[in-house]
Structure formats: C-alpha cells, structure tokens
Amino acid sequence: MTKIRMNTELRNKLFNKIKDVFENEDTQEREAFLQARESVDHHYKYASELAKLVVDRAYPPEDVAILRQFKKKYGQPCDVVAKDKCFYFAHNEDLDDDGDTKETKSHFDFGLFGNLNGSEYSGDEGKEFAVAYFREDLKAMDCNPDIFAQQNENKDNPHKTKHVDECMKALGYSGHSYNGESSNTGMAKTFNEQYYLDVIGTSYCRSRAIACTKDEYSQFEAWRIAKGNLVSKHQTWIDTIQKQCDQLKIGLKAYRYLSEGIELATELGIQVDEAELIRTNSTGLTIYNPSNLASMIKGMKNKQSANTREAKILARKQYEESLN
C-alpha cells in the first residue's frame, strides 16, 4: 500500500480533531474555569437581589407608581422614571487620614458587557467576560470565543477584529448605551432584561449615587470580582491549550506522511480513523486511492450507450422481417 502523504487539508483535519480533544479534557484549568462560571451565577443572583433592595430603598416602588401616574396625566414634564441596569453605589462608613468621614463609591454595571473595574464605559474586559460566559453557545454558532485569550499579548489586528466582531454579532452587542435601556438584541438582551430596575431621575447614573452600607458595598465588589475571576480562569485554561496547539502545529508541519500524524494522535491517547479522514478529504480521495480514483475517472466518461437510435431501428426491422 502506498503511504498517504500529508497535505494542508489533512494537517488541518488532524489538528482540529486533536485540538477538540484538548478543549474537552478534564484538566484542572478547565475545571477551574467551569467553577468560576458557576460562581458568577451565584454572585449575580445574590448581587442583583441586593441591588433591588438598595434601589427600592432609595426609590420606593410606591413613589415610582405615583410618578408614572403623573406622567400619564401630565405627559413629558413628569417623565422622571427610567429603567437602568447600572448604578453608582456609595457608602460613608470609612474615615480618611484626618478621621473625617469619606465617601466610597463605584459604578456597578449588571449588563452582559458591563465593566469590571468601576468605569462607566465597557471596554474589552466586558466583552471578555461575555465570550467566556457564553463560550459553548458561541462555539455552537461557529464563533471563536477564545479569541481574546488567544490574542492576549497581541495588539488589535485583522484576525482578532474579525473573530471579535463575529462573537459580538452573535451575542447581540450594539455598543455602549448612554440611556438605561440599550438596543442590544438576542442573548445580550435576554441576559440584561433580568437586571433592570426602576430609578427616579433620567440623568446619567453618575449624578445619582445610591446610598448603601459598607457591607452591601462589599457584596457588590465580590460580585464584580467573581466576573473578573471568570475572565482570568478562562485565560489560564486557554493558555494551556494554546501551548499544546503550538507544539502540535510544529509536529504536524514536519510530518511527511499521514501515518505519522495518526501515530502522534495514538500516543496522545486519541483515536483517529484514517479511512474517515481520507473519505472526507477532497484531494486525498483522488490522489492516493487507486481504486477510488479509477472509479471517479470511469464515472467521468460519457460513454455512448449501445442502445442507440440506429440500433433500435435495426432491431425493429429485424423483428418485422421475422414476422413475414
């Protein structure tokens, strides 16, 4: 049997099959990532319930209802109730160096792309959280949710931009919104809708710091730290996969024959069906399998059938003569 030579398509198929196994192995890094995501769910539930208590304390629901009645009666001049999912929370229980009370406040955004550092504006860190949180959903949509982690040390480039844009589109990202209710769609909209609360005052949230206790403030900080921890654990996990894949690429590039790649997979404990790789390979099927190549060539021949029009006339004539 002739050895099957490696080509780009076979290398890519082997690489993707082995990489898929790397991503689904039960490693410590993967488990830490999954646990971090479970922790985010727990902190989101607790922090959002706490936020409702704090916001309702500042803007009692009965006052909100009255103002809505006034808006219905008097129109735009009384349009002072808005929905929001991000808030400035502040407490005054700390002391400065002089022993005087000081205000401690920060911006907390419950949206999918919300900041992780207290800024009003969501940068890449908010997007990094979003792709880590919805990683499996994005993979199922043929997006690359690991692009930020893979390109962590690289500046923006066309490859990174392309995959980030695809992920953001799949999530329903529409950019930063300066009002409470953004125009996000799909998964982002569904995620965000869970966390909107009624506030009084339609100006930017920075102008309406909402009072809370120091303990409540600490709980909001713990929730935001949990989001950052998910991004960190995702980065650590993908780093381990990336290092393995870098070596895998080098090895596959050096191999001349498919059998060497199969042997590598076997040594890694990964079962690869050589026949399946060849069957699904557009060039390997034609070039390296004589039987299949012969069948393909024969199928291309447009042979004229023996049952031509002339033959049919002759057969009919012979039949009629036999009757006489």
Image (tube, helix red, strand yellow):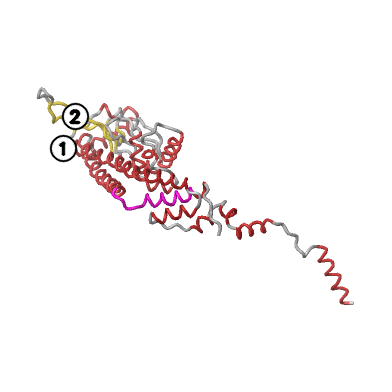
For the N terminus, the quadrant is bottom right
Amino acid type at image mark 2: Thr
Residue 293 image point, x, y percent: 62, 57
Please say whether residue 12 is one of the residues in the magenta stretch.
Answer: yes
Q: Nearer the viewer, residue 324 or 159?
A: 159
Q: Which residue is mark 2?
A: 104
Number of marks in the rendered image:
2
Q: Identify the residue position indicated by label 1 in the image.
A: 215
| Residue 113 among those drawn in magenta | no
Mark earlier in primary sequence (1, 2): 2
- Where, by quadrant of the figure, is residue 324 drawn? bottom right
Task: Find residue 53 and report its horizontal and vertical position in percent.
Answer: 21, 40
Q: Are marks 1 and 2 in contact (CB under 8 Å)?
A: no
**Amino acid bearing label 1:** Asp
Q: Residue shown at 75%/62% (left/top)?
A: 305
How many residues crowd mark 2 within 10 Å: few (<14), some (14–19), many (20+)?
some
Residue 229 percent across, percent down from the top left: 27, 41
Secondary structure of the residue carrying tag 2 is: strand
Query: In the figure, residue 73 lies in which quadrant?
Result: top left
- Local crowd at mark 1 within 10 Å, few (<14), some, or many (≥20)? few
Circle 1 SS class: helix
Q: Which residues are magenta?
A: 11-28
